[in-house]
Structures are given as structure tokens and as C-alpha cells.
Amino acid sequence: MTKRINGRDITLKVNAMFFAGITDVDLSSSATVETSLIKADAGIAQEEIVAFEDKFAISGIVCINDVGDELLEMDWKALRAAYRAKTKIPFVYGMSAVGNPKITGNMILLSWNEKAGSTGKATISCDAKILQDAELNWAVVAV
């Protein structure tokens, strides 16, 4: 029997810390296809995936760490600073239990949005590009 996975069980860690206040993470991946036609193909074009573009869309509630908690969660201030500094951020995305599928790599934040209405909690959303600076690990890893 298959096991259904709750969204809350899939996490995003950045710089080996949880992303403070995170409520939603969307992972998207699209392939770049190259078409070629050589004489040996007998007039039939061949298509090959040559690259992937992988992205996160992240949203959450603005959270600021208490003094001493900076090593536990990457908060709003740290993420905002990383965005403005164009920092490459290591990440682990997946189910937190050892042996479950995880994606590991580096990302950069491409956009940053904050919303502070007169009611409710202040929120953030950002888009991140997963860098292809190394082979992205989509395998089961014990992290």
C-alpha cells in the first residue's frame, strides 16, 4: 500500500538550518531540449535533453530569531541579507527522516517580496534558482 505524504513533512533547509516561518515551497523543473539532424538519422530529427532549469518559489510568515537562535533557523533578516549580497546558499529539500528522498545543492535568491498589511501577519515570498554548479543530487541521501 502506498503512503500519502503530508506537505508539512517535506522541508527546506538552507545553510543547514530550517527556513524560519516557511509555509509553502514549490519546486519546479523544466528541461531544455536540443534538436539535431545528422545524415545518419535518415531524415528523422533527434531530440535530447541537454539541461534542466530548477527553481523554488518560497513563501512564509516573517520571523525574527531570538538572541541565540541564529544557528537554528535562518530568519527574515538573514535571508534578506543573503538576497541583497547575492549569496550562494546551500540547501537540502525533502523529508527530514534519514534515508528518505532529498535534493541537495546550491541556490540563489532571484526575487524578494514582503507584504505587511494592516491586519494579519507580515509575509514574505521569494524565488530561488537552483544552481547547476555541480551535479544536482535528486537521489536518496542520508542527510
Image: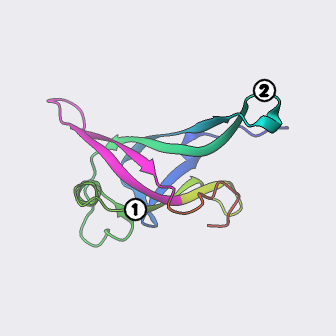
Furthest-left residue in view? 118
Tell me which amino acid carries mark 1: Ile
Q: Quadrant of residue 42?
A: top right
Q: Residue at x 46, y 43 (%)?
A: 56
Q: Earlier in the sequence, mark 2 or mark 1?
A: 2
- Reply yes or no: does residue 118 show up in magenta: yes
- Quadrant of the snapshot with the C terminus: bottom right
Task: Tell me which segment is drawn in magenta.
Answer: 105-132
Q: Residue 34 location, x and y as percent?
A: 62, 37
Furthest-right residue in view? 1
Q: Residue at x 68, y 54 (%)?
A: 101
**20 or 134, which is in the foreground?**
134
Dominant SS in magenta: strand
SS assignment at label 2? loop
Q: Residue 116 location, x and y as percent?
A: 18, 36
Q: Which residue is mark 1?
A: 89
Q: Residue at x 23, y 32 (%)?
A: 120
**13 or 66, which is in the foreground?**
13
User: Mark 2 or mark 1, which is nearer to you?
Assistant: 2
Q: Residue 94 location, x and y as percent?
A: 59, 52
**92 or 35, which is in the foreground?**
35
SS assignment at label 1? strand
Q: Residue 89 location, x and y as percent?
A: 40, 62
Tell me which amino acid carries mark 2: Gly
- Quadrant of the snapshot with the N terminus: top right
Indicate left or right for 113 with 100 as reference. Answer: left
Residue 43 disc label: 2
